[in-house]
Amino acid sequence: MTVSMTTEQIAERARRCFGHAVEVTGPLAGSGAGLRLQGLDLAEPLSPDQVGVLLDALAHFRLVHLPGQDLQKLSLPLFERFANHWGAPVPHPSNFLRGGKPGQSDGVTTGPIEMRPHEQRATAHVNAAFDDLSCMSHESPAVLVVANFRGDPSNPGRPPTGPESTARGGTWHTDIEYEPLPIYVSMFLVHRAPTPREPDGHWVQSPETSPNDPKPYFAGSSDTLMTRRKQLPRDGETAFVDTAAAFAALPADAQARCRRMRVRRRLNEGDPGWLAPIVRTNPRSGLESLHSPIWASRPGVRPPVTIDGETEGASRQLLDELEAHLLQPEFRYDHAHAPGDVTIWDNYMTLHNSPPMKVGIRSSDDARLMYRLSCKGEPALTLPRQDGAAWLDAHIAAGYRSGVV
């Protein structure tokens, strides 16, 4: 049963738990998604009541924005301590090798996991690019460094020498949905957001959106879907889709069909894979939502999914129709980033996409630098977490456990 919680109810509890200086605003999106809580200091340990407020805010609003963090206080180890309340932090595949191959590449999905040394991760390339910008200090393999620039670690302090260009943006997806236990919560801590603007007032010029050029997607989707996929924000925002609101807007018969639907997810072509529901119910709010109902969210990296009992062609048609429904403007929210922001999203109730952005940049003013943590499992009101060794070995790469509590 769904029990809706209002902005005012969250605000009342937040003021009681965090103090009357906290300001709560929302929803941030026309769909009803998004809540902003201003005035929280995440560098300080949280009480169980404080954690409970934030968990309920996410359960009811799908995305929570906590701006104004002091980056001199909120270190990345403390950010990871905060993430432990939402689930067990997961090493990002870019930070380890599995069977001798990068963890997120197609191919081998078994074999020993070897964490990459710090000097081989994205941090080394970020630190080499500009004299006036370096990553926040960290050693954790759970931290994904998200940056639009790379330097040469053998020549630190020299910007890239290739041509500056505009990358076209990513594909709509949820984080690491391709594992048997998917990512539950992800979050960004923003270090730097780009400030320059083109004559038209945007950071990047409008990218080509012709449906005749399907990249980075597979060819064959409708012009309507391809156009919606490629209409991405132009100022470094992250684009989100509210899949709870989109599910609620479906006709009753379509909702019933989705509830029965199971998709076969696979790590590689030829794998038997496993069946997973696309409708999930949030245990705190009772909200139903669509979890990654996309035929091919990672073209060229993970194989497309199929609907149990349907051919690949029929699966694609049904899932493309769902994706076209999800990407309608009324379910979308483009979230602007600023230094010191923490933004948290529920991967079961949202999709997201990276924007077109300048790469090969010459100035750190054009830098977009953020740190992402993702979590699996149950939330925890108190720390340290009590995840068992067997569960960690089964669901977390190399059984990783955060060292900061």
Image (cartoon, rainbow, N blue to C red):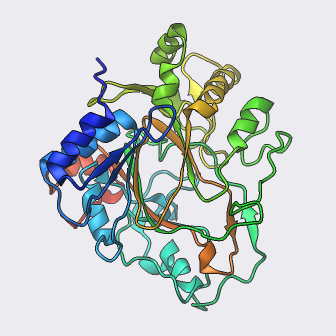
Number of callouts:
0
Residue drawn at x 52%, y 87% as measured from the top left: 132
Residue 32 in the image, given as x and y percentages of width and height: 45, 32
Q: Is residue 220 left or right of residue 373?
A: right
| Above or below 378: residue 18 | below
Picture quarter containing residue 288?
top left
Residue drawn at x 54%, y 17% as measured from the top left: 250
The quarter of the picture where the N terminus appears is: top left
Q: Is residue 76 left or right of residue 228?
A: left
Residue drawn at x 79%, y 38% as measured from the top left: 219
Residue 399 in the image, given as x and y percentages of width and height: 29, 56
The quarter of the picture where the C terminus appears is: bottom left
| Above or below 138: residue 156 | below
Residue 358 in the image, given as x and y percentages of width and height: 69, 67
Specify the farthest residue to the right. Answer: 212
Viewer-closest of 5 and 240: 5
